[in-house]
Image: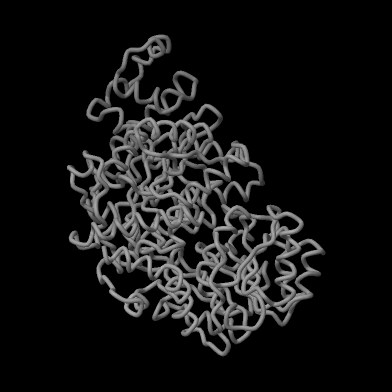
Amino acid sequence: MPAPPEAPDLTGAGPAEVLRRIFGYDSFRGSQQDIIETVVEGRDALVLMPTGGGKSLCYQIPALVRPGTGVVISPLIALMQNQVDALRALGVRADFLNSTLTMDQRRMVEQEFVGGRLDMLYLAPEALGTPGVQQLLDRGKISLFAIDEAHCVSQWGHDFRPDYLQLSMLHERWPDVPRIALTATATSATHAEIATRLKLSDAKHFVASFDRPNIQYRIVPKDGPQQQLLELLRTEHRGDAGIVYCLSRASVEKTAEFLSREGIPALPYHAGLDAGVRARNQSRFLREEGLVMVATVAFGMGIDKPDVRFVAHLDLPKSVEGYYQETGRAGRDGQPSTAWLAYGYNDVVQQRRMIEQSEGDLAHKRSLSTHLDAMLALCETVQCRRVQLLNYFGEEAKACGNCDTCLTAPEQWDGTIPAQKLLSTILRLHRERNRKYGVGKAVDVLLGRETDETRRGRHQELSTWGIGADLNEAQWRSVARQLIAQGLLAVEGDYSVLVLTDGSREVLGRQRTVMLRTEPKRPSKSRSRSSASAAGGVKAAPADLDPADAPLFEKLRTWRGATAKEQAVPAYIVFNDATLKQIAARKPSSLAELATVSGVGEAKLARYGDAVLAVLAE
């Protein structure tokens, strides 16, 4: 990337002026101003704010206003380059220290820091623990410490990083330097753990709304998940960038290959790949437009790609926190995006088995089970999914009108009798045949299926043989899945056999009514995409853009893509989609008019202004 324009002189500039001149925005959002003023004044802050809520500005602006260099603790070395590129494009003097640098490069960065010629310096948490880096920081002037992805300090969290536990030393070694810890996901328990472990109990705490209204949450029953995913991408997200999460490495590979065969550019990412391959795939995803990354949960933390239009899960996440964190990678630019999950009976069985086989004591396994129960409740709810999701984080909300249960309300039905039939079959198979079975065998008995195994086991003699013909196999599996989710049935052992619980006995004893969810036949789609466009392979115009402006928007995107490629940076570092849409709609005819567009700061106006006006003049 070419050297950025000379850094603007910000001497005496306040937060609002820095926001306008560097970042190109006229006003702060939500609690940003209060957070920034707290840190500028030299006080500590703990910030819980959703992905896409503007967390980075909460430490970047104080670092530019306060004297010295802002030191950012970032957990992923692979993403530091992109974060630094984005700041340099704004005219901010930023750099990083990590293992990717040569000795000469490292020495140069250290000299820039000690000489006071850096606004921002990015470090990995493990680097901060080394005496050499600590001594280096002692030689320079530090404006603040920013601890990004602070939930990594939670020992039983989904992204735990042991190196984060040492970050409490920041206050001990540099007591006069303000600290700001930020995360995009935390329950009240995780919030408290962050404050305790980082010694931020006396800091000012800011908890923003976790609502991401631009994301449409949809959960569908599994029915050939790869084909379901393909239909989603072809009908709603053709040509869009997105992330597909799978539980296993094998599933990642197979899904990436499947999408590629179907003409959708897709790359795999998991811990089993060569480190160089992982780095190249991640770099391509960040820098190219329209790529789909198929990955395990090893991918995604810290991904700062604003135009991810969908996040899909082909397997059940382990917790609501993990699900929220992963789906939050969609729509960071505030534009309409989709969070889609395919969920089935085998997901529940697999997750229960993984908990039983996990390391840790009984308390840890109970914690994992509690997290899974909350995720199952989200999947099985007949209420607004967003309400349930926000309630998990202690936030009250009203029905959103932009999730599948709001758009196509599922019905409930009294499933007490089917539940009794299924539970009675499981009981009889165990008691009368002295064996425990999985759901498949119980369904065979209920449907009266003649197979070699049912004949060998004389299952036809069971009193429940053939009494379930009123439901089909998929419906019976849904009954089993929902009974497990409600704790009325349990999975046991490596072979996923079904066993009764205390709740099961209440149902069999007619002491408990069982209400079950009826799945809608088809999920609703909020953003209409013409079937002609989907069938013909044409990417539909953004829903919030006047169709008359769509051709100009695409010309600007083409220019942006060529410019980004020439500079070897991600396209969004040049301008994001939201800024290009404003340019296409307002059609500025001068640099002064272009400067009024949100997202066009002084450095970008100087670097790209004339080129943008040339595209508009065409």
Where is residue 247? Give x, y as percent. Answer: 50, 39
Where is residue 368? Give x, y as percent. Answer: 55, 48
* Residue 579 vs residue 256, the one in the foreground: 579
* Residue 325 vs residue 399, the one in the foreground: 325
Looking at the image, residue 550 sits to the left or right of residue 293; the answer is left
Quadrant of the image occupied by residue 115: bottom right
Residue at the image position 47 percent from the left and 48 percent from the top: 285
Q: Can residue 414 be seen in this snapshot? A: no
Q: Residue furthest bottom?
A: 12
Residue at the image position 45 percent from the left and 78 percent from the top: 31
Residue at the image position 78 percent from the left and 68 percent from the top: 134
* Residue 239 vs residue 237, the one in the foreground: 239
Quadrant of the image occupied by residue 178: bottom right
**Position above or below: 316 against 151:** above
Where is residue 570? Give x, y as percent. Answer: 47, 56
Q: What is the quadrant of the C terminus in the image? A: bottom left
Looking at the image, residue 500 sits to the left or right of residue 229; the answer is right
**Position above or below: 2 against 245:** below
Q: What is the quadrant of the N terminus in the image? A: bottom right
Residue at the image position 42 percent from the left and 79 percent from the top: 28
**Position above or below: 170 against 229:** below
Say how many tags the image has: 0
Q: Can residue 198 be seen in this snapshot? A: yes
**Position above or below: 476 against 40:** above
Colour scheme of the picture: one colour
Where is residue 65? Give x, y as percent. Answer: 57, 83
* Residue 141 vs residue 374, the one in the foreground: 141
Looking at the image, residue 349 sits to the left or right of residue 591; the answer is right
